Structure formats: structure tokens, C-alpha cells
Image: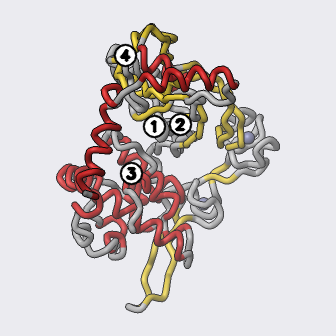
Amino acid sequence: MPRDYYEVLGVSKSASDDEIKKAFRSQAKKYHPDLHPGDKEAEAKFKEVNEAYSILSDPDKKAKYDRFGHAGVDPNGFGGGGGGYGGGYGGGAYDVDLGDIFNSFFGGGFGGSSRRRTGPQKGADLKYHMALDFMEAAFGVTKTFQITKEDICKSCNGSGAQPGTTPETCPTCRGAGRVQQQTQTLFGMTMVTKACPTCSGRGTVIKTPCTQCRGKGRLKTMKNLTVKIPAGVDTGDLLPVRNEGEPGTNGGPYGDLYIEFKVKSHEVFDRNGYNTSCSVPITFAQAALGGEIEVPTIYGKEKYTLKEGTQPGDTITLRSKGIPNKSNPNMKGDHVVKFVLEVPTGLSREQKQLLNQFNETLTERNYAKRSQFFQKLKNIFK
Ligand SMILES: [Zn+2]
Ligand SMILES: [Zn+2]
């Protein structure tokens, strides 16, 4: 079975076109075959990512997929089973320049994409998994947490050069970042442009590397973030935190951080979307006689008048006593209470006698279901 396309790209079903595009770019970067030569798994992942994007970036196909799942989209509809990248990376039908993706990795020295060498590139998006208590998810919460990410080295401000020194122009490529090289191909000798091997395409070399980041300009950095989480989030929801991803290259903006939630279960309440439910045990006498009881909701206890003759498994629905809608907190789900009959155990002899006395007073009139049931049996076996 093919994996869910949203899952492949790591976005929620409600992700915007932009979010889908961003997620695709970050996934495509991660699994690009040129970064994993000979790695069959990465290649398969890359195909999967391309396939998911070809569907989710096409409004028509996306709508079909949303309605019917994989059955709704022709598996060959995206250019022959994931072949979209086989014949030249820039030539896919997708609205994304794969040259961009290369740029952020190879500093533009790659193939024909060098025209963008100095263009600013947005940094990678990151994902953070966060567990929330049931009530935190229901009502929203402000959370402070720590992330570890690649960030610009504060010591050298990202230049990679020891403070007080500056990067120098690369002597091999004289700052161009690219070198021309003669290469033997199937079609004879060709001049190809490659990333400069001395400076890896940066155009500069560092004589005295920064001691903090060893010349990389970036460092694994821990950062505390405080984020306000809206009421109503559920397991699998993604909350974007803008500009808290990894730093961009060539002056590009930071990527974004996406918080993915997992909501813990609750000892009393269950949740289904914005609706909540719980079971309330009642006694035999309460069920038979009815009367005022208290039922729990996520907002506290509510008084409820149990009707006479309540049956085990009967439910009531309390409108708008469920979880606030995350896009409109004034809209709330419903709360369903299910009554569970608890039969008393450990009766004393006296209690048993009383119950027997009481039982002898009952007639078929008091047991609608039971008398119907035995009537049916009689009809079957007569
Ligand atoms: Zn540094
Ligand atoms: Zn160079």
C-alpha cells in the first residue's frame, strides 16, 4: 500500500499550498539521489516524495485524493510511476526549481543551476514532536521547550573565519565558485562547469577558521522557545513557528519550525475530533427511580436529571460541552455521557432478603424487554 501523501510530505491535511511546497522542497532535499549515490532507500523515498507532491500540488488531483484516497488518483498520472525526475531534474512538471534545491547544498556549483549561486535560500524547516495533556490540548497552553538546531555561529557571525580575520578569495576559482573541467563522456570530451573543489563553491577560503565552529560558520545550538498553543489542537496537528528552522544561505531567511502534537489520553474523557465522551456508572436504584445526578464535562460537573427507567448504555448529548474549535474557539464540539449500570456486589443476607422481597413484587409489566423476549422464544419453540 502506498503511504498517505500527506504523511510522506509530513504535513497535515489542512496544509496550505505553500506549506505543501515547502515540505516537498525540504523532503526532496533530504532524499535527493545525488546526495545519496547508490542508496536505493533514499531513491525510493525521493520517488515517493515526488509522487506525493505531484498529487498534492495539483488542485484537481488533490481534491480527488482527499475524497477517494489513492484509489482516486491514477498511479500513472504523474509521469510514469515516479519517473518525473529520471530525465533531468529541472524538467519535472512540478512548479518547483530543483536547481534551487541543489543550490542550498552545493553553493550553486552544480550543473546548470549556477545562475542562482548567490541567490538567497531559505533555511531548512524543522519538526518538533510535542506531547500534550488532554486538557492542555483542549484549552490551549503556553509551552516553553528546548530545541537543538544548526544555527549561525555567534562567534564568527557565520563567516567561519576566526574573529579578527576575514575569508579570502579562493585562489583556485578566483572567487567564482566554479571551475571548468574537461571530462570524457560517451559523446567525447566536454567542458563541464563544476563546483570549485578548493572552496566547495563558496568562492572564498578561510585561512584561520573560527575555533568555535571550526570554520563551518554554523553550530549545533540549543534554543529555548515559548509558544502559545491554541485550544483544540489534536494528535497529528502541525503548528508552524515562523523563522525558527535552520538559517538560510546567502542571506536567505530562516526556515520554519513545525510542532507536531501528540495528545495523551485522559482517565475519564475520550475525544473524537472536537467531541468528548465519558461513561458514568449509576446504581440500580438511580436507573430505576431517576433523579438528580452530576455528570462530568471538561468544563466541570453539570447537574443532570436522570429519567426514571434509564437503561444501561443509554446516552445523553450535552451540546457545545466538547472541545473548542481551534480556528474558532466559540464553536465547540458536543459531550456525550454514557450511563453504565453497576450491579451491587457483596450483599449481606439481610440485603438479599430485602431484594428478594422486592423482586417478588415485580411483574412482566415492569420488564418490557424481558416479556417481549420470552414471547419471541415461545413463538420459536411452539
Ligand atoms: Zn564560527
Ligand atoms: Zn574556489
- The residue beneath circle 2 is 261
Mark 4 vs mark 3: in front = 4
Which disc, if any, is residue 6? 3
- In the picture, the quarter occupied by the C terminus is bottom left
Do the residues bearing badges 4 and 1 touch, measured as CB atoms within 8 Å? no
Do the residues bearing badges 2 and 1 touch, measured as CB atoms within 8 Å? yes
Determine crowd level at label 1: few under 14, some 14-19, many 20+ residues with C-alpha closer than 10 A: some
Instruction: Specify which label sits upstream in the sequence, 4 or 2.
Output: 2
- The residue beneath circle 4 is 308
Amino acid on which the number 3 mark rests in the picture: Tyr
- Disc 4 from disc 2: Cα separation: 43 Å
Look at the picture and state if 88 lies above or below 370: below
- The residue beneath circle 1 is 237
* Secondary element type, mark 1: loop
Residue for point 44% across, 21% down? 287
Residue for point 42% across, 24% down? 337
Q: Which residue lies furthest to the right in this view?
A: 211
Determine crowd level at label 2: few under 14, some 14-19, many 20+ residues with C-alpha closer than 10 A: some
- Disc 2 from disc 3: Cα separation: 15 Å
**Who is closer to the viewer here, 338 or 57?**
338
Q: Is residue 136 visible?
A: no
Which image quadrant shows ligand 1? top right
Instruction: Specify which label sits upstream in the sequence, 2 or 3.
Output: 3
Instruction: Locate residue 258 relative to residue 88 in the image: left or right.
Output: right
Amino acid on which the number 2 mark rests in the picture: Phe
Instruction: Locate residue 353 relative to residue 117 in the image: left or right.
Output: right
Residue for point 33% across, 39% down? 14
Q: Quadrant of residue 309?
A: top left
- Disc 2 from disc 1: Cα separation: 6 Å
